[in-house]
DNA sequence: GTTCTTGCAAAATATTTGCAAGACG
DNA sequence: CGTCTTGCAAATATTTTGCAAGAAC
């Protein structure tokens, strides 16, 4: 049993061929990936299979979805939180030029002052700008 | 000339009937509104007209768009920044129960530590949870 | 054999554009 | 008249679901 199958089993996800491939693909990238880009990477696979794979991963908290303002929702595996149950509360960075989206896992979001009786459950924090590749 | 027409003219937007109505509608709500909800409020008006109205407002920096994770982009007029040219860098709150989205203009987002050579240009910060109406 | 997964097709939802008619100055 | 705005229709883009076949145990 590989490391990848371990990760899936740990989250109670049956390690099917497709799921292993998708997880492996996610682990090979430090970016958040869209359904479309994952589909493109596996010409053989069906879009809805990948879609359901990602939804399964998301439900089992193996990945989290990021809405970076492009039309495409992106999914990222967060290495640190991968072993724990806590909610991911870090920033994301979206490059306006190359459209890449990264998790900024080096810092968590600070305490935020909410109006009275408002209660925070999750967050989707996206900073936009230029990444180091595009910032000349 | 009304206050509303003033606001439009100040931003170099010709105050047409539709634009006045949409701006008035936005000003009457403290929430961010979707194209759909605005269309519903004006049964007579065409969706693409409202769409283009909002895009015009956005381009002229009278409103800003918020992607709150629902499928629908929402638009909000921010009173404070309405008179200035600065970029809106405040948090937004999206209620998971009633789907309302609010601008939290009482605080700006803090300094964020970006990776080397990354440059911030805008942000889309959305906190999700329960608003005071839904938090029982 | 029962349950979970996959592939194909198609539905559903929102956004966006083309174009001609109309309003405005 | 020329330009900007509007209304209608249709195109685009994604996400999402139905259903039957197939795989797993």
Image (cartoon, coloured by chain):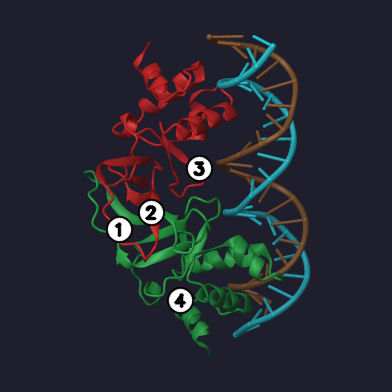
Chain colours: A green, B red, C brown, D cyan
Q: Is residue B20 visible?
A: yes
Which residue, given by chain and number where applicable, does mark 3 sit on?
B72
Q: Is mark 2 on a helix, strand or loop?
A: strand
Task: Determine which of the numbered discs, if any, sits on residue B81 in the image.
Answer: none
Mark 1 is surrounded, within 10 Å at the Cα level, by few (under 14), some (14 to 19) or many (20 or more) other residues, namely: some
Between marks 1 and 2 in the image, the one whose residue lies nearer the viewer = 2
Residue at 36% across, 46% down: B95
Residue at 37% across, 18% down: B6
Q: Which residue of the protein is positioned furthest toward the bottom in this rendering?
A: A1
Inter-mark Cα distance, 4 to 1: 32 Å
Task: Determine which of the numbered discs, if any, sits on residue B120 in the image.
Answer: 2
Which residue, given by chain and number where applicable, does mark 4 sit on?
A11
Whether the residues at callouts 1 and 2 have beta carbons within 8 Å, the answer is: yes
Q: Is residue A22 left or right of residue A12?
A: right
Which residue, given by chain and number where applicable, does mark 1 sit on?
B112
Q: Can residue A125 be seen in this view?
A: no
Q: Position of residue C15 (x, y in %)?
A: 56, 41
| In the depicted structure, whether residue C18 falls above or below residue A103 | above
Inter-mark Cα distance, 3 to 4: 31 Å
């Amino acid at each position: 049993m590989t490391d990848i199958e371990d990760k899936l089993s740990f989250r109670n996800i049956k390690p099917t061929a497709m799921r292993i491939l998708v997880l492996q693909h996610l682990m090979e990238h430090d970016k958040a990936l869209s359904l479309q880009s994952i589909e493109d990477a596996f010409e053989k696979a069906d879009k809805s299979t990948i879609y359901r794979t990602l939804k399964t991963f998301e439900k089992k908290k193996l990945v989290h979805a990021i809405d970076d303002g492009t039309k495409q929702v992106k999914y990222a595996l967060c290495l640190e939180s991968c072993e724990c149950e806590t909610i991911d509360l870090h920033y994301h960075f979206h490059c306006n030029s190359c459209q890449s989206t990264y998790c900024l896992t080096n810092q968590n979001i600070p305490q935020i002052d909410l109006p009275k009786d408002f209660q925070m459950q999750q967050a989707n924090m996206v900073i936009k700008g230029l990444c180091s590749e595009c910032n000349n």
